[in-house]
Image (cartoon, rainbow, N blue to C red):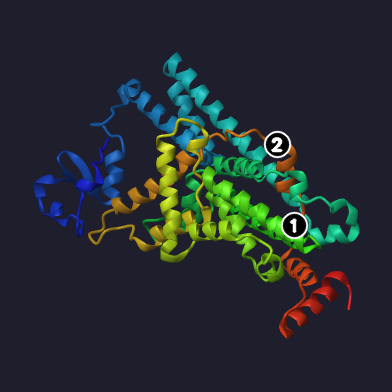
Amino acid sequence: MPQTPPFSAMFDSSGYNRNLYQSADDSCGGLYYHDNNLLSGSLEALIQHLVPNVDYYPDNQIRKIAPKILQLLTEWTETFPYDFRDERMMRNLKDLAHRIASGEETYRKNVQQMIQCLIRKLATLSQYEEVLAKISSTSTDRLTVLKTKPQSIQRDIITVCSDPYTLAQQLTHIELERLSYIGPEEFVQAFVQKDPLDNDKSCYSEQKKTRNLEAYVEWFNRLSYLVATEICMPVKKKHRARMIEYFIDVARECFNIGNFNSLMAIISGMNMSPVSRLKKTWAKVKTAKFDVLEHQMDPSSNFYNYRTALRGAAQRSLTAHSSREKIVIPFFSLLIKDIYFLNEGCANRLPNGHVNFEKFWELAKQVSEFMIWKQVECPFERDRKILQYLLTVPVFSEDALYLASYESEGPENHIEKDRWKSLRSSLLGRV
């Protein structure tokens, strides 16, 4: 099997080290080596190099290659289990596993364990998807609930969880659970709708069997709208100010935990126009702590401050002595954006037609780091009542948020007055 040297040895300061291609002595059948390590080659040559033949694995040496094939299949099913939601893939896996198992008893047990573990993972994913679908089907607009059952929605987040530190911990539970279901192959499927090395061939678009990435982004949006809803809903100004200060404390604790996704969702909700326009409410809020949080998540200079904080959390995780110190939950939309631009901004092939190892190494590096972060078990005790509220309580739509905002602090100009009248008419049936 080919070995890959450290990439620092492959690339000089000007990019790809093209001098390596000038030595015919280092080439072998379209593959290029440096210090006996495979460095590059055309896709066709790389595939041919991996195909068994008489020189590699003669037919009468099945016992010799069986452990290697079993190891490959085990790593594949553990790292990319969602590939096998495809019926053809599962059939091929079972067929190959049967051939290996027919050799020795030891192989048979290992094959059974591998298949059973894979089936358990896929069953767990199906159960998770059923829960998400159930939550989605029961979600309603909060304004609708208020109009039909005004007394049933008197609760707010503070009555359910008065301690902002506890809420931050429960948010971390939700984040880590949803992250745990995202597979590395989903990043590929999200961006590469065609064969990454052939623009004419459709490759991944028909193979996408999960939507965990989308579900996670939807959670971020829900949390943002939940925050805005909780702030805009109270009738009294002092209650709205109290709610803002509460969420500032929640966001601050999320930052301390390393839960940057919930942190950014909360900041996003507090910066929504229906909330930010409540000037009389904000005048009663001590905003110094919020200013610090906004500075940490400032998008200028490509989120420099956040990236610095993320690196600090990642370093803390590497040397952690407790589960809490291991928590790193990145601002997910930015992670997706980084991977997208890396994929779009770098060519899949080098000018000589060879595969761009450096690009795919960097992609793998980013996804691999994420895969480590998502495996952390949440150290905080679960509170089902708080989790149920966060996941299922109805939230305002954007129009309902504006209406609640105008009802709390009246319109300031003709544009806002016109919109207020329109919303009262359409949402409340009032003139």
Most distant residue in the top direction: 105
- The quarter holding residue 412 reads bottom right
Q: Which residue is mark 2?
A: 383
Residue 11 in the image: x percent, y percent? 21, 52
What numbered label is drawn on residue 354? none
- The quarter holding residue 318 reads top left
In the depicted structure, whether residue 204 falls above or below residue 405: above
Q: Is residue 86 visible?
A: no
Quadrant assignment for the C terminus: bottom right
Q: Residue at x 54, y 43 (%)?
A: 257
Residue 299 in the image: x percent, y percent? 48, 63
Whole-angstrom CA distance, mark 1 to mark 2, is: 21 Å
426 to the left or right of 54: right
Quadrant assignment for the N terminus: top left
What numbered label is drawn on residue 395? 1
Query: Circles 1 and 2: CB distance less than 8 Å?
Result: no
In the depicted structure, whether residue 3 falls above or below residue 12: above
Most distant residue in the bottom direction: 414
